[in-house]
Structure formats: structure tokens, C-alpha cells
Amino acid sequence: MIEYAVGRLWTEMPKEFLDFINPAAALVPMPRSAPFPPRQANVLWVPQRICHALAAVQLGARVLPCLKRATAVQKSATAGPGMRPDAAAHLASFHAEGAIDPPDEITIVDDVITKGATLLAAASALQKAFPRASIKGFALIRTMGLVPEIERLVHPVLGEVTHTTWGGTLRLP
């Protein structure tokens, strides 16, 4: 299914999206909400599968799983109202490992983006590990909030995630 979704994205991608994506970028999969168990070979890691699918259609050069969770955070998908971890909590839980061949361009890849706190924290952690790298983010799915009607299932958009003055994050669109 991931390969199908990436294939659809590839065929329906607007030109400005192609200008945003760098085929030479290292694709860094977003870590899960908890550190991997010691035997991680059988663990489903959706962002890593998305990375491989993106690389297969030349939307990235290599998969670089250099961002790890040192400590667990509350899983956003199951968090109650007001209980989602903020960017600071995510950043405190991340550990970025250096690479023998440091990338000039990095695209962080996640399956779903809601407010962008995880993505913003991941970018901060990677910027410390790779200070010369240009870092962007990609999510296969974005939440839409309480919209009355969804007009298109495949609708690539470019946006921005920023810190707010009250300590949260804001994703536009």
C-alpha cells in the first residue's frame, strides 16, 4: 500500500513539489514513539518503508536511519486531549547519530503530520548532528482537522511548521 501511495503521489505531484524535493537528499525516517526493542528486525517501521518507496522513484538518494529515540514519549495517535508531546518533549527524547558520509541535504520522512511538533524537533536534532545540512520534512499524510468535506484524497501541498509564541507548533497548511 505504501508503494502504491508513493506511486500515486509521484504521478500527481505538482511542479512546485518537484522543485521542493531534492533527489540527492538523504531520507531520514522518523523514529517511533519508543526506542526499538533489541530485536528490531520484525518491527514495522512505516516511515522507513516510505523512505524506501521514495528512493525507489528517485525522490531521495539513500535511506539514512540516523535519528533514534533515546526515551519513549506518549504516542500522539493515542494521546488524550492536551496530552500530545510538544516539540521540546520530542527533542529531549531524540538522539541523532553522525554519519561517515554526512549529507548536504536531508529530508525527514514521517507517515502522518498533525501539528508538526515531532517534525520540528527532529529537524532541530538533525541540525545539531549535521550543522551544514539543509533539512526539509515530508509526510505522506496530513491531517485536515474538522473539515466538512474532503475534495481530494491525493493533494500534495507545501507548507511550513513553526514554533508559536505560546510554546506550541503551528503547521500551515
Image (spheres, rainbow, N blue to C red):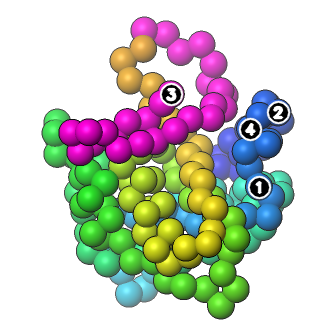
**Amino acid type of the residue that numbered disc 3 sits on in the rendered structure:** Pro
**Amino acid type of the residue that numbered disc 1 sits on in the rendered structure:** Asn
- Position of 111 with respect to 27 (left or right) is left
Q: Secondary structure at mark 1?
A: loop
> Which residue does the image show at 46% across and 74% down from the upper left?
128
Q: Which mark is residue 22?
A: 1
Q: CA distance from mark 1 to mark 3?
A: 21 Å
> What predominant SS class does the magenta segment belong to?
loop
Spot occupied by residue 34 in the image (x, y as percentages of width and height): 31, 69
Q: Which residue is mark 4?
A: 17
Q: CA distance from mark 3 to mark 4?
A: 14 Å
Q: Secondary structure at mark 4?
A: helix
Point out the stretch of residues depicted in magenta. 148-173
- Position of 145 with respect to 61 (left or right) is left
Q: CA distance from mark 3 to mark 2?
A: 18 Å
Q: Secondary structure at mark 3?
A: loop
Please tell me how crowded label 1 is: few (under 14), some (14-19), or many (20+) other residues with Cα within 10 Å. Answer: some
Front residue of 21 and 56:
21
Q: Which residue is mark 2?
A: 15
Mark positioned earlier in the residue sequence (1 or 3): 1
> Which residue does the image show at 77% across and 55% down from the upper left?
22
Front residue of 112 and 125:
125
